[in-house]
Each structure stands twice: as C-alpha cells, then as structure tokens.
Amino acid sequence: MRTITVLNPKGGCGKTTIATCLASHLSWDGYQVALADLDPQQSTSDWAELRPESYPEIELIPYGAKKIRASRGTDLMVIDSPAGIHGAELQQLVRRSQTLLVPIMPSPIDMRASLRFLENLFGLAAVQKGSVKVGLVANRVKENTIIYRELNGFLGKYRAPYVAHLRASMNYVRAAEKGLGVADLPRYLAARDWEEWKPLMRWVEGKRSQPKK
Ligand SMILES: Nc1ncnc2c1ncn2[C@@H]1O[C@H](COP(=O)(O)OP(=O)(O)O)[C@@H](O)[C@H]1O
Ligand SMILES: [Mg+2]
C-alpha cells in the first residue's frame, strides 16, 4: 500500500480540500482508497461521514484511531495532516509516506511560511535520499493576479516539481459540505476543475511521485 500525505503546517492552505478531493479522484480511477485524518479539527472525518453511499467508497481512518491502518487490499492511503506539525511528529509522518503534496496559497504570508517549511522539509534525510517524493500545488489561485504570478515564479524555481494549480472556486466549498470532491460533481459544473486536476493525477499515478524500489 502506498501513502500520500498532504502536508503544510500553515493552516487554511487547502490540505483537507486536496486530501478529500484526491481521495475521491483516486476512487473514481478505480483504486481502493483510505483517507486518514490526523487533524484534531476532524474536518476530513466530518467529510467522510457526510459522503453519500452512491459515490465511490472511501474508507475513513478517523482522527484518534489507535492505529493508522487501512483494510487489506487498500491500494492507496491519503493522509490529511494537521496545522502546526513539526519536529519528531513531522519526521515520522514524512518517513511513513512515499509521496508528499504541499499546497501553497498565493498570499505573501502563506508563501513566506511555506518557504520556511520547504527548507525544513528538504533538510530531512528521507527527502534528501529520495525515499519520499514531494510535489507542490498552488491552491486557491486567481489567474491574472500579481501575487499568482509571483507564486508561479517561486514554485517554478523550487527543487520539487510544481504539479498543479487549482483555481479558487466555490465548487470546492459546495462539494466539501456534502462529503464530495470536485471529481464527484457533474461535468457541467466542474469540467474546468477536472482539467486542473489532470496534471496532478498524472503525477500522483505516475512513477515520478514514487521512490525508486
Ligand atoms: N481551491 C479552493 N477554492 C475555494 N475555496 C477553497 C479552495 N481550497 C480550499 N478552500 C477553502 O479554504 C478553507 C481552508 O481550506 P482547508 O482545505 O480546510 O485548509 P487546511 O486543511 O489546510 O486548513 C476551506 O473553507 C476550504 O473550503
Ligand atoms: Mg484541514
């Protein structure tokens, strides 16, 4: 089983949104998916409880579970991590993952905090050795804004691949309140979001997001 962790200690950058949407995309792609909630705010656990049965199933490993372990046969586990994670807890989470997705918002405060976090992350042995692969995701972007261009420049130059940019859209908010991701919305509403998720899914489902065996 492979573990993909959505990680950035900055609160509000889109970890839960991306973790839940990624889980739903993967389940539509035919994988058996588990979603683990490590955040005491339990937004992912709430989301999974709201998820209607008529949509592809995602196994929840709720916040506070004794063991973060998925059922047998699970292909992929997506972990939603809490704000403020650092030190030994951060190291442990990085070590158990094969892939890290780091969402970053186009705001000066978020970019500065994220830059500091990335420096810290790239100092970790697991990342340096390549036993975990890191992908950057610009989230909640408004195209044609100066700050988005700055974020683009910043992410484009970074050591990790810049795998997707996701627009700011009420689709994410509306989907989340029903236990859905953008992959679960109808095409006429979410076609543009599906397009934006394509490069992210190609990276996640491809070899470059996985350590060499
Ligand atoms: N791309 C987006 N477009 C619009 N709203 C978004 C987007 N990504 C996240 N949000 C909203 O921003 C808020 C914070 O996102 P969330 O995923 O909870 O962040 P985190 O888990 O990192 O704290 C939520 O209300 C969420 O619905
Ligand atoms: Mg969250």
Image (cartoon, rainbow, N blue to C red):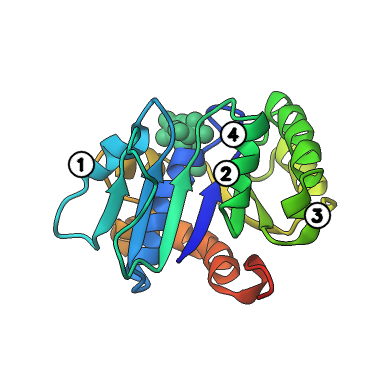
Residue sticking out furthest to the right: 157
Taking depth in this image into account, of 17 and 7 the one nearest to the observer is 7
Q: What crowding class fits label 1: few (fewer than 14 Cα within 10 Å), some (14-19), or many (20 or more)?
A: some
Q: Dots 4 and 2: beta carbons under 8 Å?
A: yes
Q: Give me the C-alpha separation between circle 4 and circle 2.
A: 6 Å
State yes or no: Cβ of the residue under disc 3 lies below 8 Å from any atom of ligand 1: no
Circle nearer the N terminus (3, 1): 1
Where residue 144 sits, quadrant-wise, is top right
Q: Is residue 64 above or below residue 207?
A: above
Q: Give me the C-alpha separation between circle 3 and circle 2.
A: 15 Å
| Label disc, if present, on residue 89 of the rendered structure | 4
Q: What crowding class fits label 2: few (fewer than 14 Cα within 10 Å), some (14-19), or many (20 or more)?
A: some
**What's the amino acid at mark 2?**
Leu
**What's the amino acid at mark 1?**
Leu
Q: What crowding class fits label 4: few (fewer than 14 Cα within 10 Å), some (14-19), or many (20 or more)?
A: few
**What's the amino acid at mark 4?**
Glu
Q: Residue at x 39, y 47 (%)?
A: 68
**What's the amino acid at mark 3?**
Gln
Badge 2 is on which residue? 93
State yes or no: Cβ of the residue under disc 4 lies below 8 Å from any atom of ligand 2: no
User: What is the total number of numbered labels drawn onto the structure image?
Assistant: 4
Callout 1: SS: helix
Badge 3 is on which residue? 128
Callout 4: SS: helix
Q: Is residue 56 left or right of residue 163?
A: left
Badge 1 is on which residue? 50
Q: Is residue 65 above or below residue 100?
A: above
Where residue 178 sits, quadrant-wise, is top left
Task: Give coordinates of residue 39: x percent, y percent.
Answer: 43, 31
Circle nearer the N terminus (1, 4): 1
Q: Residue at x 65, y 40 (%)?
A: 91
Q: Give me the C-alpha separation between circle 1 and circle 4.
A: 29 Å
